[in-house]
Amino acid sequence: MKIVVCIKQVPATTEVSIDPETKRLVREGVEIMMNPFDTYALEEGLLLREAHGGEVIAISMGPKRTEATLREALACGADRAILLNDRVLGGSDTFATSYALSRAIAKIGNVDLVITGKQAVDGDTAQVGPGIAAHLGWPQAAYVSRVIESDSKHLVLERMHETGYDVCSLELPGVITVLKDINSPRVPTLKGRLASRKASINIWNASAISADLTKIGLNGSPTRVVATRSPDARDKHTIILDGSPEESARELVKILKQRIKL
Amino acid sequence: MKIDSNGSEYRDIWVLAELVGDDIHRVTFELLGVARNLASKLSKVKNREEEVVCVVLGSGLSEESRKRLFAGYADKLIIVDDEALRVFNDNIHAAVVSRLVRKYRPEVLISGATSRGRSVMPRVAVEVETGLTADCTGLDIDEDSGLLLQTRPAYGGNIIATIKCENYRPQMSTVRPGVFKLPEADFSRTGVVVQEELTEEEKVSRLRVLEEQTIEDATVNLSDAKIIVTGGRGVKGPDGFKVIEEFARAIGGAVGASRAAVDSGWISYAHQVGQTGQTVQPKIYIACGVSGQIQHLVGMQSSDFIIAINKDSEAPIMKLADVAIVGDLFEVIPEIVKLVRRDDELKKAV
Ligand SMILES: Cc1cc2nc3c(=O)[nH]c(=O)nc-3n(C[C@H](O)[C@H](O)[C@H](O)COP(=O)(O)OP(=O)(O)OC[C@H]3O[C@@H](n4cnc5c(N)ncnc54)[C@H](O)[C@@H]3O)c2cc1C
Ligand SMILES: Nc1ncnc2c1ncn2[C@@H]1O[C@H](COP(=O)(O)O)[C@@H](O)[C@H]1O
């Protein structure tokens, strides 16, 4: 099975700021990590490779320093890593990002399965996985919490929704987006870490993936962030109830009654 | 689709309905209310009549449901009724919506930011080549340009961004359930029904839904809940969650959990709130035995009203809370439940 796992590098904190000029995230000097959901995507790729053979290719789009996150994927056991890196890819929204990633997947060739995280914790959109599927014309299953059965031609899986689960069969090639519930990611071995330091990462630019320049970067992005602000401050006044349990309960029920009526 | 001049061939505000079994999800009515508002504003800017169109994909939509959609401010229904649409299949649903969009050219297309909405809309956006803004909490029409102003939180709610889609149509967004008020229904309203067929080609999908497992328990559905009672590590174990569940049932809420509680195996992942769980925005959020680490806070800090019960008055959640109860949850919660059960007024309200 040839599996591509999409991995995004995200800020390790949510205390982020936006450049007032460019309206883009200030990435300088911010600590980074692998998007948490993508660690589960990677683990699921590794598990499927262990079951069926084949290879796991980690792919990311981002600035040069994203290499560090791809090395982490290699340390965990990914066979190789590709970084899409080009100035013209900067400022891509989910349409443009999923387009660029889909071009790279097409270039890799003969891919059976693409796995993405449910969403990135910075943008919180959950749109890139389905977007890749649509660009490739492949079927998708989003919010996958369990792979029940798998072979080289199809997966039987469980996807979660607000009031339960659907059991689905997905014919490959296809795309799945995964939840935390799906597995427990391994930690890299020392040997893996050492090897990942020396491994070479393929860097592809826009022409390497034969990208249509009208579909990538800021200019190829249909959406535009036109303003950003901090959320409205919460009413800072906290009512503290530190009496006996009976007293606190009585006070709280009074407050609850007011709130529920609102 | 990219527009060259002013895109005047695009018109109307579309709402993609969400069906739950034979019923219509509440968010559909919330969105019809918003759409009504947007349509009036857009009509003014463009100086022509803009309608609210509700697109319903399903099987066997009842007469009653149609009436409710008109009463909820739809001017027109586009109904695609087919057995193949009985279950939710992202691929089939997206193919149909994309075709309808190409045919009728709506100015705006919105759906609920539910797991289904968030699966199907990104596919449609790519298929018709336009932008999509995820999980919006505000929508408005710019009075000069007539463009849709889409407001959404990002970075765990620490930044609120306004997003436009100027040169592509339709302007698409998914909208968080529970953010907009349900409009008062008006059963005197009627409207037009347009029936569309599913093509044979669209029925073919490489994804098949084999089985649907619905959990009827209302304490599981976090995204529709107005009240959420969450337990953390302070709940101590699966038995402790019975106390949380009893509290939730007494006040008509759902049960949430911190990651620490889920990872300990005390309760299932479906309940997890936070960065690697769900983002929720109920009217009332009650955190019991939760410390309030940032990864938990980003999933619930937009709740309207936050109550925390914790032994430690210094826990971060106590600073965020509107009401901070310093105490042992095992002593305080039973007292609250007792009072709630005795209170007829409260019992009726929940
Ligand atoms: C990548 C990543 C993603 C994460 N995603 C999430 C996520 O989605 N959701 C999430 O919740 N966390 C998430 N976390 C974990 C988060 O950082 C915290 O570890 C977790 O939220 C702590 O859970 P807790 O508050 O239940 O436990 P603790 O931090 O241990 O807090 C327990 C609290 O209970 C109180 N307490 C104890 N006994 C009682 C009693 N009898 N009565 C009253 N109070 C009592 C204590 O004073 C304490 O404040 C994530 C972490 C990482 C690194
Ligand atoms: N720049 C990127 N490079 C690689 N994968 C990405 C990128 N952006 C998003 N993804 C993948 O898409 C998923 C959803 O991201 P998002 O739609 O941004 O919330 C992530 O969990 C990643 O697997």
Image (spheres, helix red, strand yellow):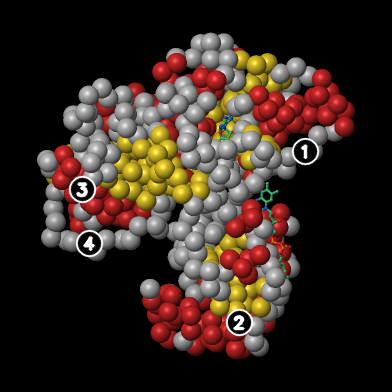
Residue shown at 64%/53% (left/top)?
B295
Residue shown at 27%/61% (left/top)?
B183
Classify mark 4 as within 8 Å of ligand 2 or not, answering yes or no. no
Looking at the picture, do discs 3 and 4 lie on one chain? yes
Q: Earlier in the sequence, mark 2 or mark 1?
A: 1
Residue at image mark 3 = B41
The residue type indicated by label 2 comes to Leu
- Badge 1 crowding class, 10 Å Cα cut-off, few under 14, some 14 to 19, many 20 or more, is few
How many numbered discs, if any? Answer: 4
Indicate which disc residue A241 carries: 2
Of the pair B207 and B258, the residue shown nearer to us: B258
Indicate which disc residue B185 carries: 4
Looking at the picture, do discs 4 and 1 lie on one chain? no
CA–CA distance in space, label 2 to label 1: 43 Å
Pinpoint the chain carrying mark 1: A
Query: What x and y, as percent, mark residue A221?
Result: 42, 27
CA–CA distance in space, label 3 to label 4: 20 Å
Residue shown at 46%/21% (left/top)?
A216
Pinpoint the chain carrying mark 4: B
State the quadrant of the N terminus of chain B: top left
